[in-house]
Amino acid sequence: MNSTKVNGDYRIFGNSFILQSQYDYMTDKKQENAIFDKKNYTWMIIGGAVVILGLLLMAGGKTQDPKMFDYKEVYSARRITVAPILIILGLLIEVYAIMRKPRP
């Protein structure tokens, strides 16, 4: 938005004049309406990455022979312990990112 200051009371905004106090109110209001700041989005990305990492660790377990079942591969500590913990941790990070209040 381009505006030109005419004098202390008015600004030219496009083809119209607006009061300086209205201009200040509009520009301040846009900054106050931000729900999340940069840190919130950073935490959301980190939480999403942790969830995706947990899902990737949980994936797999396919054998070459469909008639054969490998207990060690399906019930490994990586799939039944580490991956669910990472998914829950990622979801907790997401909750923190959403609930965190932006600092002025």
Image: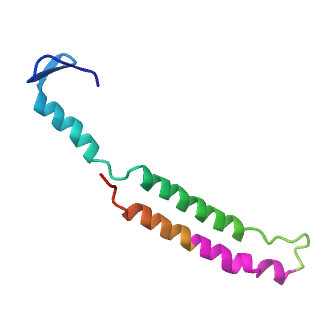
- Residue 8, percent from left and from top: 10, 22
- Residue 9 sits in quarter: top left
Q: Compared with residue 78, is residue 4 higher up or lower down, i.e. above or below?
A: above
Q: Residue at x 37, y 64 (%)?
A: 99
**The furthest residue to the left:** 9
Q: Is residue 23 magenta?
A: no
Q: Main SS of the magenta segment?
A: helix
The reply, left or right, for residue 47 in relation to residue 60 is left
- Residue 103 sits in quarter: bottom left
The reply, left or right, for residue 49 in relation to residue 78 is left
Q: Is residue 71 magenta?
A: yes
Q: Residue at x 16, y 37 (%)?
A: 25
Highlighted magenta segment, given as a residue range: 69-87
- Residue 62, percent from left and from top: 82, 70
- Residue 96 sits in quarter: bottom left
- Residue 41, percent from left and from top: 46, 53
- Residue 27, percent from left and from top: 23, 36
